[in-house]
Amino acid sequence: MHANRDLITRYLKDKLNFKGFDISDWEGIDRITLPPHSNYTYSVLASIAAGIDMVMVRNNYIDDAVSRILRVKFTMGRFENPIADFSKVNEVGSQPHRDIAREAVRKSLVLLKNGKQGSEPVLPLPKRASKVLVAGSHADNVGYQCGGWTIGWEGFSGTANTTAIVYLMGGHRH
């Protein structure tokens, strides 16, 4: 995707008239080549030519598309009001926020595979399923389920950084 000019520039910027700036995934351009990072010069050129405006890298900093990025920041008023408005900080994590988050999860879940080809689909599960096994390192680990950019940019393991709860099968933890 990071080198896909048809989608980034022709579709997003030209057809949809997107006026913001496109940011790569963290070290996403490193994975344009196989093996990853085998031709960094090519990856940088291909991603910028495709329409990526800001490349998120750990050590190889790239100063590109500064005018687009600054235009968005000026439009947002980031320079006139550089300090965040904390007047509604007590609403963060409130029940209405949690309700919206649950609705967003319900509406954004994606099923990548639903059983084997030619067999009955696995989902939806029967409403009266007696037992369901949820297994693996992510099954009861809020940190793994949240992933990166949720609480900390790199993600975390366990529950030490959050008060979230993993709900399995009707709210029962197993």
Image (spheres, rainbow, N blue to C red):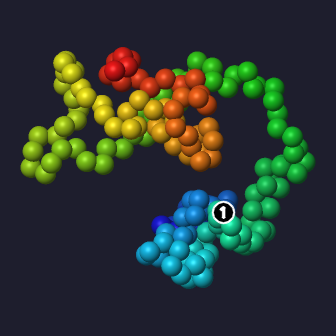
The answer to which quarter of the image holds residue 8 is: bottom right
Q: Residue furthest left?
A: 118
Q: Position of residue 164 (x, y in %)?
A: 53, 25
- Specify the amino acid type for callout 1: Arg
Q: Is residue 78 above or below residue 2?
A: above
The answer to which quarter of the image holds residue 62 is: bottom right
Residue that mark 1 sits on: 58
Q: Position of residue 136 (x, y in %)?
A: 34, 37
Q: Residue at x 78, y 68 (%)?
A: 67
Residue 150 is left or right of residue 145, and the answer is: right
The answer to which quarter of the image holds residue 119 is: top left
- How many badges with numbers are in the image? 1
Q: Residue at x 76, y 25 (%)?
A: 88
Q: Position of residue 173 (x, y in %)?
A: 37, 19
Q: Nearer the viewer, residue 160 or 65?
A: 160
Q: Secondary structure at mark 1?
A: loop
Q: Residues within 10 Å of mark 1 (few under 14, many from 20)?
A: few
Q: Residue furthest right?
A: 80
Q: Residue at x 68, y 71 (%)?
A: 60
